Amino acid sequence: MEKSTKIEKIRHSLSHLMSMAVQELYPQVGLGVGPSIENGFYQDYDLPEVITPEILPALEKRVKEIIKENIKFEQRDVDFDEAYKFYKRDPYKTEFIDDLKTAGEKKVSFYKSGWFDNLCAGPHVGSTKEINPDAFKLISIAGAYWRGDEKNKMLTRIYGVAFETEKELEHYLWQQEEAKKRDHRRLGKELGLFYFSDDVGPGLPLFTPKGEMLRHLMESFVRETQTRYGFQHVWTGHLVKEDLYKKSGHYDNYKEAMFPPMLDENVSFRLKPMNCPSHMTLYNEMGKHSYRELPMRFAEFATLYRYEKTGELSGLTRVRALTQDDCHTFCSEEQIESEFSLDLKVIQEVLTAYKFTDYKVRLSLKGKGGKYVEDDKKWAEAEAALRASLKKNKIDYYEAEGEAAFYGPKADFMAKDILGREWQLSTIQVDFIQPGRLNCSYVAEDGSEKTPVLLHRAVTGTTERFMGVIIEHYAGAFPVWLSPVQVKILNITDRNLKYSEKINEEFKKLGIRAELDDANETIGKKIRNAEIEKTPYILVVGDKEEKTGSIAVRERGKGDLGAMELSKFIEKIQKEIESKI
Amino acid sequence: MEKSTKIEKIRHSLSHLMSMAVQELYPQVGLGVGPSIENGFYQDYDLPEVITPEILPALEKRVKEIIKENIKFEQRDVDFDEAYKFYKRDPYKTEFIDDLKTAGEKKVSFYKSGWFDNLCAGPHVGSTKEINPDAFKLISIAGAYWRGDEKNKMLTRIYGVAFETEKELEHYLWQQEEAKKRDHRRLGKELGLFYFSDDVGPGLPLFTPKGEMLRHLMESFVRETQTRYGFQHVWTGHLVKEDLYKKSGHYDNYKEAMFPPMLDENVSFRLKPMNCPSHMTLYNEMGKHSYRELPMRFAEFATLYRYEKTGELSGLTRVRALTQDDCHTFCSEEQIESEFSLDLKVIQEVLTAYKFTDYKVRLSLKGKGGKYVEDDKKWAEAEAALRASLKKNKIDYYEAEGEAAFYGPKADFMAKDILGREWQLSTIQVDFIQPGRLNCSYVAEDGSEKTPVLLHRAVTGTTERFMGVIIEHYAGAFPVWLSPVQVKILNITDRNLKYSEKINEEFKKLGIRAELDDANETIGKKIRNAEIEKTPYILVVGDKEEKTGSIAVRERGKGDLGAMELSKFIEKIQKEIESKI
């Protein structure tokens, strides 16, 4: 959707040019799929031998030469007989032709570039002139089963990345390099934040004291913000009777993502994969509601469990235990716009505090299609309310027709991290359907019984995934307010231990998270250790500091700030914590 | 254990006297069991007709008369033949005699009191002179299956309560009456704190915004206290692979209390019924530990799930979802005493804040018996450490030989609530076994690898049960620091709405939990509503208050305090919150 057609053509054409270079080396090569993908392209090959990444520079060099030959890409339609004949020695292409025949096609499409003729639907660039030979790179080799089926033969997949300009390529490669350094799985271990254990199970992280403190700070911040904006918190636990999900419709639509049932003779329980049915049940149990009580805004930090495939799990960004900062607002139709606006404000404040200032909203609308609940008037009104609200709040957005949830339109926040990578974080979804299914109601001003609209909203998404994102965003160097340890106190000699302990106690009393490193090491070693832990402030305490009642301050990223009175330092750090800088 | 033998004899004898009164009315009555129980006694009868509680005053009167006859209780041993003959028309007593025969007894014991002769092992009072006729009461009738088996006949059970003095009886009856008024299940609904739903499942409470706020305040207070005492919080989620419990030994010893497994082809998961194996797994994943890192104190507010039988569930005091304020301290054997002492201090501070000042500790020791792990030296040292620590902290305790956990000695806090009812709340347990089973280790100062000792500790026990206890303890009138709504603002007329809203905002900014009741009701009605909600402070705002920039303050339990400057009131309430009075 967001890819330019031009760059897609370049990427797809590069996969053909790479195949030319490969076929020059291996004339009998079999050709699997070779699409353009995000940031680049790949092509699957059936090769007579195993190749290693050492081959890539030579291949790349050859592709560059081919580009410079200014070869034209020429499309033509071909009879099935001719196509089968052309590929009589390639079982993969033959299977593709079979598929097209089964699909009832009359002809098949070929693209010719120089001597290389290839079954392909296109589109491609007109000529290699359009490709910048310095804006692509072949980057890796992997195994890939033919048609993704492990019962089939394993083919060799070569990946490349490609852009329109050399600058874009360089930026991308820098981003990748930087992302590798910031990989939250590696940093999580180095900083001692979380672990996974085979004894507990895949995708189920365990958080150390430091990691739990980070979770706690993240959730407390969202809780405090939500409370300030008039949201109330509820608690609904971690499991419910399976029947509730049959009523809500989640059983039919979502069963695959749930953990297996807990079955006894009389009843079947499920771990909660989402909160909405529980929040609606609580709403109902609280008794009859009046329009005067609306909007009711139920927020909860509940850990949800989703049975993601083990192969798809990845550090904290894809887990099975996910603690959503989830909120459900029960409101009237007239309140959609103002409640949506309130949700936007909460999200803006939180994202800004985390320095995600470059974001836009993807507004997913009904469009023309059949999968949606029928009520064109409701849809039109809700979509208009969302647009109005986004405009009023001056939020950059684009519309995605036909991408709405089945129960109503939604707004997803796409935020760029410091490397420019885009993450889908917050979401607000309007729901016309579920409250009716679970018989939620309120008495309207005219005495009639009405069904409330439900707004689903998550700010950071889930604590786990967002922690993964911000570890990479900050490269593990969290701002002071978010650092599990804010201050590390290092005594130079044992003589200074008592004074160091006194300072430590003073910080504790003020709620500043300090740690004293009293190990019998050189001060240089202690400083290095504290730097590896990315502590925002390192305070060195020796005889001189003790005598003058001061501390020697080192600030992360800035180095030695020199001696400072303790009270001055406390003032400085408290101001920074307060303002979340 | 704690019952005096004398009162047990009185209670048991009263069940005989009651049987005399019953048999006078129903000469053919069959007699089931009739023991002394906590606070009283009961007796099961096979009666020819259904009786209702209306009969109790007459029965009671008759028992009083019998007591005044100064009847002696006389024991004698009887041959089986004679016993069978005596009870030839009573199938229940005949079954008892069968049991005694099967058990290999030579004779059976009878107790005679007046004309009433009864198969009974005793003991009894010497004569009814020892029974105070004004210190007992027959209180209720219930159905009870013969031998507790629902396939058997339902008998009629009559309950009585009995004490040595009339004063004790009166206190008990007052306590019962008061407890009924304070029943947390009723108050929980009235105050809108929590609900149970058939859609979610038995024993799985849902907490409303007010109930969640109460939970949050309770847990935040314990968290803050724990942090201040040097405990660190961790997060280990809600489920683990079943195999972990096979390693730890919980699978064999605790399987019945677990929710059914979540099974897929490759693996079986269980909801966590306790945290210890998870905390030990985290300890291990964090890498090799040195003696310098000990003690390590892992605390967690994890919701645990236990599959209590539905018939045993009761409000919040017996639930299936229980959030323990659980802590596990990994320490060396030498650190047991000081760590136990630290745990005691945390518990004392928390219980005192909740006004549980009347408590004693039951120190459960190994005693002489076979079920314990063999290592007499370790046991003796640990028991000595616990005793020393209890003495040093001046905590009243008594020893219970043979009542320890299989893995080590333990200390349970038995605390009296305001009604004098005793609750088992906090617990500290020493564990020599589990760390070894899960291969926890640390490198000692001499370089050798050692197994840490584990201290299990809970302060309030579980959030849910403790909430049930404190709702009854405070009769729902929580102290200011613990009240979900601390201040209710009531505007007299619409003219005063703006000023009321301003005050409300001011409270919010200060973190004082205020609510504005702007309903179109009379001020009298609004005050009554706020009183029903047991709000600590009610602020009435009318023209007079608005003009003088003041508020009219009503304090719960004290009534109208008159007009007060807002700043003065804020000072007062902040002081109360701070000091937790």
Image (cartoon, coloured by chain):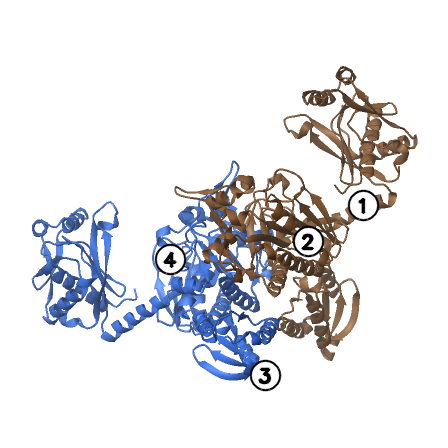
Chain colours: A brown, B blue
Q: Quadrant of the C terminus of chain A?
A: bottom right
Q: Amino acid at mark 3?
A: Lys
- Quarter of the image for residue A139 reads top right
Categorize mark 4 by other alpha carbons within 10 Å: few (<14), some (14-19), many (20+): some
Query: Which element is circle 4 on?
Result: loop
Which marked residue is nearer to the observer: mark 2 or mark 4? Answer: 4
- Residue A180: x and y in percent read 74, 47
User: Foreground mark, 1 or 3?
Assistant: 3
Identity of the amino acid at label 2?
Glu
Q: Chain of mark 1?
A: A
Please tell me the numbered disc located at residue A172.
Answer: 1
Could you tell whether B230 is left or right of B194 in the image? Answer: right
On screen, residue A139 above or below B366: above
Question: Does residue A447 appear left or right of residue B170 in this picture?
Answer: right
Q: Give the residue number, with chain letter if any, for mark 4.
A: B314
Image location of residue B205, percent across then percent down: 45, 56
Q: Nearer the viewer, mark 2 or mark 3?
A: 3
Q: CA distance from mark 1 to mark 2?
A: 26 Å
The CA distance from mark 1 to mark 3 is 66 Å
Q: Amino acid at mark 4?
A: Ser
Q: Is residue A147 above or below residue A510?
A: above
Q: Identify the secondary structure beneath mark 1.
A: helix
Q: Where does label 3 land, which residue?
A: B547
Quadrant of the image containing the N terminus of chain A: top right
Q: Residue furthest front?
A: A446
Any part of residue B143 in sight: yes
User: Which of the 4 image quadrants contains residue A312?
Assistant: top right
Query: Comparing marks 3 and 4, which lies closer to the viewer?
Result: 3
Residue A102: percent from left, percent from top: 67, 21
Which residue is tagged 2? A190
- Mark 1 or 2 closer to N-term? 1
Cα distance, mark 2 to mark 3?
Answer: 62 Å
